[in-house]
Image (tube, rainbow, N blue to C red):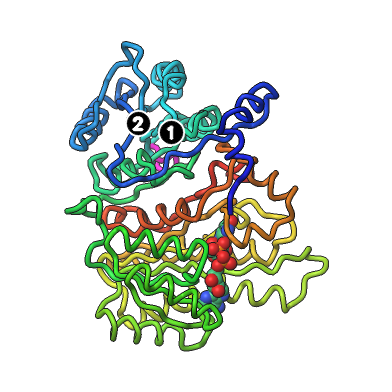
Amino acid sequence: MTDTYLNLVNSGFTKKLAKQLGLPRPAVLRRHRPGAPLVPGPVLVLHDDASDPDADALATRLLEWDLDVRRHATGDDRFGAVVVVLTEAATPEALSAPMLALGPVLKRLAPGGRVVTVSRPAASAGSAAAAATRQGVDGALRSLAKELRGGATGNGIVVADGVPVTAPSVAGALHFLLSGRSAYVDGQLLPVTSDAGTLPADPDRPLDGRVAVVTGAARGIGAAIARVLARDGATVVVVDVPAAGDALAKVANEVRGSALQLDITADDAATRLLQHVRSRHGRLDVVVHNAGITRDKLLANMTAEKWDPVVGVNVVAPMRITQGLLDAGALGDGSRVVCLASTSGIAGNRGQTNYAASKAGVVGFVAASAPALAQVGGTINAVAPGFIETDMTARIPFATREVARRLSSLQQGGQPVDVAETIAFLASPQAAGISGETLRVCGQNMVGR
Ligand code: NAI
């Protein structure tokens, strides 16, 4: 659905009026367009003293992408992005110089610009001082993201100790976070835990030759996922309940894939899915557990009729299907499982105990299943959307909806395509070093982390 307010404050007279009245002015986000530059201007690489070699390695990577890379903020150019390399920072004082160098540059960040920090995880730091430093990056990044304007975003890549910054998943994450594909990902820190992965032969079609299944794909976010995976080269099997059969067939035609009418809660769902995929396409590489439902009610008024189906569709079915596919040997080297969580599952939401239990369940399921997927050479991750403009959120009463939209750093809801782009990145060969994680696509919603 459309955000009329966003359109008004970005056009003519109403734009001026909103400025004069000091009203929130959400920017039109910089989203991926084929052929558009990766970033809207030169990229500045900053670092603390100790991280110089990693900064060199990342600057080299950026040059490979034909970017205009600068190591100093001289002149008065507007920057398209700033990459802040803090991998070797070992004392809280070490953050001072790079962060203070970054400050004035933020005013020169182009609309839709990006700030990306690259650091190491606090949990594995060798000393209390190093842990304080690494955790400090987390706080600084999340805060600076809240200060950015003009649709610019700030995100971090947290590279496990022992994994070089030249690892394919660091490159993949950096490319994704700089690009328009991550338009609605803001204030997030994405862990890379291994140097697995390969860079795609054709960066525009990273999923070439892969077969992907998307559940709940007749409309909304699921249909957007099917479109983006197909655009990235995958053959897509779209799945939805028989009642949504007509809409499902349309999506299947549009993406030149195949449609499977299936209730994912059916006992034989994994078997039927596998039969379809094997007979029609011969292989299975990507499974996106997107189908989901809400049955909101305050817990005081909750009934089994509202609780059980939500848990059944949102978490039990993805768990059973994933296990069924693993048992059948259908998930192997390079497999990708991506689930839909929700910020409600992370922060909690009034009237959604059932939904939040199911979506927090997805976060737990994904974290616990990473080793099983690693054993066969695959990954499993989740994305947690915040407020996304779909039929589901169109049903929220007007005033609540308007507040929910503005309560993020980007002051607007996301589009289904924003969730889809993030899933496509997690499904790509480059993302092999990211598993067990839940990445929020929420415009840095003020609710929760
Ligand atoms: P939607 O309600 O527009 O679409 C969900 C689709 O799943 C429908 O086509 C429906 O028929 C299908 N489905 C439901 N039960 C099914 C079953 N048993 N078997 C097969 N298909 C089934 O929902 P939307 O907004 O596109 O959400 C997609 C996913 O994203 C859901 O998991 C939802 O919980 C999650 N999400 C959505 C957010 C939003 O703001 N829209 C926010 C956070 C998470």
Q: Quadrant of the N terminus?
A: bottom right
**In the image, residue 97 lies at what x, y percent?**
40, 16
Main secondary structure type of the part rendered in magenta: helix
* Residue 110, horizontal then vertical, whole percent: 41, 26
Calculate the distance from the C-alpha at mark 2 to the C-alpha at mark 1.
7 Å
Using the image, tell me which numbered label, if any, was put on residue 148: none
Mark 1: secondary structure: strand
Which quadrant would residue 225 be assigned to in this image?
A: bottom left
**Foreground residue among 406 and 23:** 23
Q: Position of residue 13 (x, y in %)?
A: 62, 27
In the image, is residue 307 above or below residue 164? below
- Residue occupying the point 28% across, 86% down: 279
Span highlighted in magenta in the image = 121-125
Q: Residue at x 39, y 82 (%)?
A: 273
Confirm whether residue 203 shows in the render.
yes
Q: Which residue is mark 1?
A: 112
Q: Which residue is mark 2?
A: 40
Q: Is residue 284 left or right of residue 108?
A: left
Q: Residues within 10 Å of mark 2 (few under 14, many from 20)?
A: many
Q: Residue at x 37, y 35 (%)?
A: 119
Is residue 315 in sight in this rendering?
A: no
Query: Where is 325 relative to 342, above or below?
Result: below
Position of the C terminus, as image quadrant, is: top right
